[in-house]
Amino acid sequence: MRFSAFVLIFAASVVSAETHTTLAERFWNSFHNRHPVLKRIRSGDSVVTRTIDASGLDENAKRVAQGPNPLTGPFFIEGAEPGDAIHVRFDRIRMNRNMGWTRYRLGMYAVTPESVESTFPAKYKMDAAVPGRDELLPWDLDLARGIVRLREPKSNAVKFEFPARPMLGCVGVAAQGDFGPSSGISGTYGGNMDYNEVVEGATVMLPVYHPGALLFIGDGHALQGDGEPTGTGIETTMAVTFTVTLRKKVNLPGPRLENAEFIAAIGSQPEFVSSLDRTLRVATSDMVHWLTGEYKLEPWAAHQLIGYQGKYDVITVGGSMALRIPKKHLPARR
């Protein structure tokens, strides 16, 4: 009898989950709790939406907002309260425009002072990729084949044609307090993390600081290398479907990520606030808590697993690190 009642309750919760198609007409440049809610959803619901590119151009290359990184949202999750967490599974992240753009050169923060002296000018050609910009290169995106190709300039040595790996640079909730950090930076709330593992099939876990959590997404990249050393991915627009699950009283210290292969603790901070070793320590400390808390490893076992199966990702060269552990080495959750 108890089992039957459980099945009925579970079935009712599944049936009640909804899919909402919600397209924003106004976009935001900060993770602030005061922005008007775009859509109210419940735990288990899915959202079909879209993002515009980092400069404010939509999928038709029409300017609908200003940069940096205009955000779609916020999405209000019913029942979410400070101290809870939300799990955002990205069911679909797909390019929906045939053009993207990147910066012409590496950020000077990514090279040595000696290299700065001999590098080339940042300017390429006015209007080559985005009207009014002269430091950007245009890329052609083959939506059918999932290929990205640099349109110009042409290299005599390298063929700039690669498989696309669509991702979202911005995933975050409204930040702590009555403060709206820019969509150009990141922190414990997520934000402009630019982690190239935020791809289709990944689940991003975020702490909740305000009622409803107030989730924002944006800053689609068709492809991005580790660390985002040019300061951009291949910036473009995305068609996105995500599903949100509410977890009560989790008290996450910061963002985490999970996919079919690994779990990752993310040390997320604004760029250039401190060196990467700080966020390495943040990510490592959180992974210890995750392994000992959710997976019930002994503290010494967590240290050993990190020491001999962990892999560090440079998320942004000026700010954030992540620590991954392969799921094949983890026990079942208890």
Image (cartoon, grey):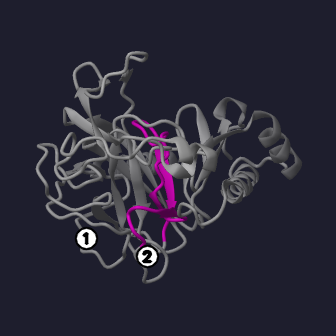
User: Mark 1 belongs to which amino acid?
Assistant: Val
Binning the other alpha carbons within 10 Å of mark 1 as few (below 14), some (14 to 19) or many (20 upward) gives: some
Residue 130, above or below 326: below
Number of callouts in the render?
Answer: 2
Q: Residue at the spot x=20%, y=36% of the render?
A: 96
> Where residue 136 appears, x then y in whole percent?
30, 43
Labels 2 & 1 near each other (Cβ < 8 A): no
Binning the other alpha carbons within 10 Å of mark 2 as few (below 14), some (14 to 19) or many (20 upward) gives: many
Q: Residue at the spot x=34%, y=60% of the render?
A: 216
Q: Residue at the spot x=43%, y=83% of the render?
A: 178
The outermost residue toward the bottom is: 178
> In the rendered image, which residue does mark 2 sit on?
210
Q: Secondary structure at mark 2?
A: loop
Q: Which residues are the magenta region?
A: 181-208
* Residue 182 among those drawn in magenta: yes
Question: Is residue 225 rendered to the left or right of residue 50?
Answer: right
